[in-house]
Image (tube, rainbow, N blue to C red):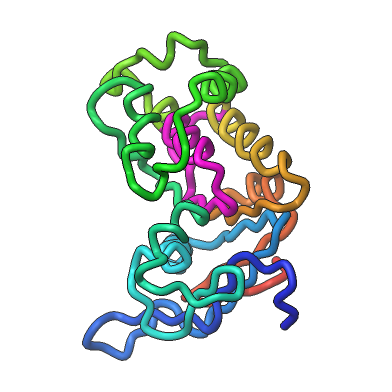
Amino acid sequence: MDSAGVLLDAQGLGRFVPGTQQWLLRDVSLAVRGGDRLAIVGPTGSGKTLLLRSLALLDPIDEGRVLWLSQTISARLVPAFRSQATYLHQRPALIEGTVEDNLRLPFTFRIHAHQDFDRRRVASMLEMVGRGADFLARSWHDLSGGEAQIVALVRALQLNPTVLLLDEPTASLDASTTQTIERLISHWHERTNGKRALIWVTHDRQQSTRVAQRVVQMNAGKLLEGT
């Protein structure tokens, strides 16, 4: 396979249940290039989230490997890799405090020490989704599920990732908030002329056609193209 332009490259990934011969993923290969918008659909239990977590190196891989820019990712480089290939959970984890406290949190980590919190840029993203500057002062206790997901998404996007790994980020949200999240991600993807990519896991086939130009089906730990 031509590796030109490949950002994230999964080669023959496999995951099995410890102590058994039951494979949860087997021989899964997937190449993601700049500009790609890929949706993975499939029934509950088909392995979608498991694959996404494996791509983010959040879980151990029993077989195969994940490459970033054609390079093996050593343990030392995992934090830098995750800063570029960012995994967004379906249920966002926020800390106690205000929205701004949560948005400033990543800059306390060494891997982001070279970046500064840009309040003006964050306010611009929030304005895009109908939240004014006063939203930054809201307590995390007072946020709806949709607002918490917006905060988690803005927290990720402000760090300028190259690939987003989206694990059903709108599964529990209403139609209006879902459209808001989709719009913000689309704006992020389009801003760098084909240098960014996303993988969006969803159970909603209509959403998959809205957010992606390529849709693959996952079934029993296998990827099936052309669905």
Image-quadrant location for residue 31? bottom right
Name the residue rendered at 41%, 63% in the picture.
53
Left/right placement of residue 135 relative to residue 224 reads left
Judge by depth and name the residue closer to the eye, 131 or 170: 131
Name the residue rendered at 67%, 39% in the picture.
186
Judge by depth and name the residue closer to the eye, 199 or 179: 199
Judge by depth and name the residue closer to the eye, 82 or 107: 107
Whether the magenta-drawn stretch holds residue 140 is answered as no
Query: Residue 51: x, y in percent?
Result: 46, 67
Image-quadrant location for residue 40? bottom right
Name the residue rendered at 44%, 9% in the picture.
134
Name the residue rendered at 67%, 46% in the picture.
211
Query: Residue 78: x, y in percent?
Result: 40, 64
Left/right placement of residue 226 relative to residue 135 reads right
- Which residue is most to the right? 193
Q: Name above or below for residue 212 compared with residue 56.
A: above
- The quadrant of the picture occupied by the C terminus is bottom right
Query: Residue 14: x, y in percent?
Result: 43, 82
Left/right placement of residue 106 relative to residue 84 reads left
- Which residue is most to the front? 114
- Which residue is most to the bottom? 21
Q: How many marks?
A: 0
Query: Residue 90: x, y in percent?
Result: 41, 45
Judge by depth and name the residue closer to the eye, 160 or 189: 160
Q: Which residues are magenta?
A: 149-175
Whether the magenta-drawn stretch holds residue 154 is answered as yes
- The quadrant of the picture occupied by the N terminus is bottom right
